[in-house]
Image (tube, rainbow, N blue to C red):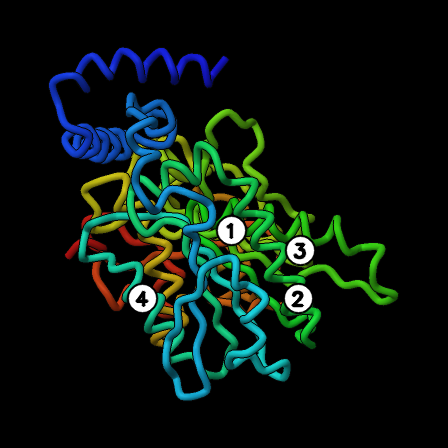
Amino acid sequence: MILGWKIILGLSFCTLCRALSVEQVQQKNIEILTEYFNKGWKEFCDAPVDEGVMSLYNGINPSDTTIHVLTINNQSVELPIRALSEIRDFDINPNRKTLLYVNGFYTDESYFSIQAHLHMLQARRRDLNVIVVNFAKDVQQLYYALRHHLTLHGYFISKILSVLVGNGVDPKDITLAGHSVGANAAALGASIYTTEHMHSYSTFSIIDQLIAIDPCSYICDSHDIFVRRNVSSRVVVIHGEGNLFGVREPLGTIDIYPNGIGFYPKRRMQPGCESWVCSHMYPFLLFMESLVERVPITAVKCESWMQFKDGQCNYTDTIDIGINYPVTAKGLYFCITQAQPPFTLKEDGLEYRSRNSILK
């Protein structure tokens, strides 16, 4: 039924095609996707684009997904997803912890510089095996990932996990992380990996942890967003927006709500943000600041945002945003952060501040 609707819409759109060249129609497609993207995932999924024309262009197929690895000389190499078995030939040391990061979000705002942050992460954290999977290099690739290819991307992630484990990396040393749609694909990949291998190894272990950074709240034509507590030994959700893009409800072993945004249904943005996209990107920037700059962004366990505001928290139970969490940490955690980098307020971020004081 959905396919039929898209065909009918495409035929209607092609009334315009008679007057416009293919290139002009494609340019219109990109403009429509960009416009609808800013309205949130549901509107983005239903964007009235001409998929027939879009299919004529490179970059929308699952095979266009790329993997980014490092050589022993610290050179970044981009591989096509079909070469996933070749990652064992690069600087992957089983004695190090492994971070498999899935990028599933795109913005053309240079301030956020997703690719630049990921490149710095690989270059500076040489104590980790850092592998980046990217299926959102532009807005149309993100559209096809969300509308058509998410299950395949989850499958790709599961295969990369299999290659890593098959080459000596302990599942207990693997952290899967992803932002936005990447968080959902990472969760699905961990789930597929567990299902495929739980009876294959005599001493099977599920993946150590999933860090889901403001997971996508709406997947086209699906009621399942895939992020749940049992996909890995620990699931950490770092919330950010909770309105058009991210989820509100606690989904993990640990749920972190910077500035309380998303915990209540009140429509508010993160400090310094003037758009929902910015608020959705904000926890990604916190995560990168923690990992790249190694700056602690500390959160405290609390039963609710109101209790945090009233100072009624368990101040003996704190965690730092990143990839290392105490085994005893469970529940809801809150913190205050700043509008501009450095975002951390360190220990001062454990005490509530008014919104005006944050923005000063």
Residue 181 vs residue 6, the one in the foreground: 6
- Report the Cα–Cα distance between label 2 and label 3: 13 Å
Sequence order check, earlier mark of 2 and 3: 3
Identify the residue position indicated by label 3 in the image. Answer: 232
Say if mark 1 contacts mark 3, CB within 8 Å: no
| Amino acid type, label 3 | Ser
Q: Residue at x 40, y 61 (%)?
A: 350
Give yes or no for contact between labels 2 and 3 (Cβ–Cβ under 8 Å): no
**Three-letter residue code for mark 1:** Val
Mark 4, residues whose alpha carbon is within 10 Å: few (<14), some, or many (≥20)?
some
Which residue is labeled 4 in the image? Answer: 117
* Residue, far left: 19
Q: Amino acid at mark 2?
A: Val
Q: CA distance from mark 1 to mark 4?
A: 20 Å
**Residue denoted by label 2:** 327
Q: Disc 1 vs disc 4: which is toward the camera?
A: 4
Badge 1 marks a residue whose secondary structure is strand
Q: Position of residue 297 (x, y in %)?
A: 39, 66
Residue found at x 66% / y 55%: 232
In this view, the mark in front (1 or 2): 1
Label number found at residue 253: none
Which amino acid does the dot numbered 4 rest on? His
Please state, as top left, top right, bottom left or bottom right, where the C terminus lies in the image: bottom left
Identify the residue position indicated by label 1 in the image: 237
Q: Earlier in the sequence, mark 1 or mark 4?
A: 4
Front one among 347 and 59: 59
